[in-house]
Image: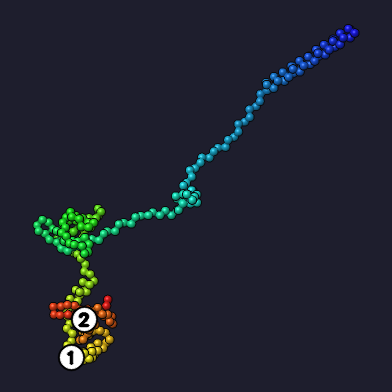
Amino acid sequence: MRRKLLLLNLLLLGLLGAAGWELRQRWLESREREKGLLAQQVPAAPSPTIPQIQPVSPVPAANYLEVAQNMVFSKERNPNVVVEEKPPEPVPAFPIVYGTFDLGAGPSVFMSDKAGAPQKTYRVGDSVGPFKVTDLSRTAITLEWKDKKFEKTLAELKAKPTEQEKAQQTVAAAPQVEPPKVQGVTSDEGLKEVQKEMSKDGLPGVNVGAQARMCAPGDTAPAGTVQGGFRKVMTATPFGQSCRWEPVR
């Protein structure tokens, strides 16, 4: 029995030795294989080819036009730029000149800053309305307004006559034609017949060959009456009332 156990132990010991040797051989092989792998030279991989980058050209501002026009909050959305220019301030009305005088201390001028305003005497350096008198002579005047100078003759700044004054001057200059006298006519009926006979053309007054027509005897129409394209005008003269019919303009 003891011999069998001894043989069994020897057998197990031999198996253990054989297993240890086998393990050592495999370990040595793995070491050799590891050394062989570590000793191998792995060829370096070629570097990748990097394409050359083209330089970026600057983008013209005109290329953003479509983007700017379609952006709601862009100030440049409207391609038609409207430049609002403030209109120049109009030059105010020039003063009105009524006359000049010189007493040895330099010329002075009678002026009013506007029609209907009281007349005053002005000299160089005085202000008349928005203007300032910078130079003055017997025939001309220089006015300054907001660093602008205006050279005017005194005749240019004299008061212009109104249409009514022009008409009165024309009437005063026109020769006064006395209405024809009718002898032997005293009744109203006779005056009407004479008036009818002297105005056969259907127009008021008596045709005396001038532009205006003289009033016919017995004409009682009030002044200002308009008839047949003529207006009745009554003018006081040193010799009494002058009556005529003038064309309506």
In this picture, residue 242 sits left or right of residue 202: left
Which residue is at 24% across, 89% downward? 196
Q: Amino acid at mark 2?
A: Arg
Q: Characterize the local packing of mark 2: few (<14), some (14-19) or many (20 or more) Cα atoms within 10 angstroms.
A: many
Instruction: Indicate the quadrant containing the N terminus: top left, top right, bottom left or bottom right.
Output: top right
Callout 2: helix, strand or loop? strand
Q: Residue 201: image x %, image y %?
A: 27, 87
Please name which of the two marks, 2 or 1, marks the residue nearer to the observer.
1
**Residue 40 showing in the rendered view:** yes
What residue would you read off at disc 2?
Answer: 244
Quarter-wise, where is residue 235 in the image? bottom left
Extreme residue toward the bottom, this view: 184
Q: Residue 171: image x %, image y %?
A: 19, 76
Q: Residue 234: image x %, image y %?
A: 20, 79
Which residue is at 46% across, 47% downward? 61
Quarter-wise, where is residue 100 in the image? bottom left
Which residue is at 34% across, 55% downward? 86
Q: Is 71 placed above or below 179 here?
A: above
Q: Say which mark, if any, is on residue 157.
A: none
Instruction: Indicate the quadrant containing the C terminus: top left, top right, bottom left or bottom right.
Output: bottom left
What residue would you read off at disc 1?
Answer: 186
Q: Residue 20: image x %, image y %?
A: 78, 14
Callout 1: helix, strand or loop? loop
The earlier-in-sequence mark between 2 and 1 is: 1
Distance (Cα) linking label 2 and label 1 = 22 Å
Extreme residue toward the top, this view: 2
Q: Amino acid at mark 1?
A: Thr
**Residue 154 showing in the rendered view:** no
